[in-house]
Image (cartoon, helix red, strand yellow):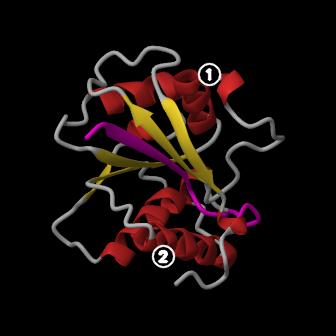
Amino acid sequence: MSRELWLLRHGKSDRDLAVDDFDRPLKKRGKQDLERVAIWLLKENLIPDCFLSSPAKRAISTAKIIHKIFANDALPIFQDKRIYQEGFERLKTVLAECPKENKQVLLVGHNPELTDLLIYLVGASNLPDTDKLLPTSALVRLKMPEDWVDLDAGCATLSSITYAKLLPKEVG
């Protein structure tokens, strides 16, 4: 089985609160969108074997909503500060450290890093031409090489991009 990387942008957060960017919580709509994504993943039998998340409040909340649907307490959520505002090159470092036995890795993070990583891994010409490639709660599935130590530009293949807003309100 080949390895897959799933990129999930955090859910819609509340920008109007007077809190530090790191501490912004999810909005109600963000939580609802993520529940739809999680139910869709379960229905499609897409179950990650590794959860990586930014420690920012909106990202870890996103990871927990997705994780809860799978009800697998034995599968931890790994938080890594390098996923938060350190650029896509740091994301590549995080992925390089991901054990090879993890075949379906879910990475919960932020823009612009996720979009930059996606463009690097797939190539801009292999992506849909849209104003907003990764809105909040968007999930990207990538077919990846087996070895993630040195990820070259264009090494991945886009399997799909799933937008929460296009999923049915009740999936399942």
- Of the 4 image quadrants, the one containing the N terminus is top left
**Residue 99 occupies which quadrant of the picture?**
top left
Give me the residue at 61% from left, 85% from top: 170
Residue type marked 1: Gly
- Residue of label 1: 123
Query: Which is nearer the eye, 52 or 161?
Result: 161
Query: Would you say 20 lies left or right of 149 here?
Result: right
Task: Report if residue 9 lies within the magenta region.
Answer: yes
Q: Is residue 156 above or below residue 70?
A: above
The span from disc 2 to disc 1 (Cα, nearest Å) is 30 Å
Query: Which is nearer the eye, 54 or 43?
Result: 43
Query: Which is nearer the eye, 60 or 138?
Result: 138
The magenta region covers: 1-18
Q: Say what secondary structure mark 1 lies in.
A: loop
Query: Which is nearer the eye, 86 or 29?
Result: 29
Q: Is residue 105 above or below residue 94?
A: below
The overriding secondary structure of the stretch rendered in magenta is loop
Query: Would you say 73 lies left or right of 44 here?
Result: left
Q: Position of residue 21 (x, y in %)?
A: 62, 52
Disc number for residue 39 = 2
Q: Are marks 2 and 1 in contact (CB under 8 Å)?
A: no
Task: Report if residue 147 lies within the magenta region.
Answer: no
Give me the residue at 58% from left, 67% from top: 25
Give me the residue at 32% from left, 73% from top: 70
Q: Position of residue 35 (x, y in %)?
A: 53, 76
Residue type marked 2: Ile
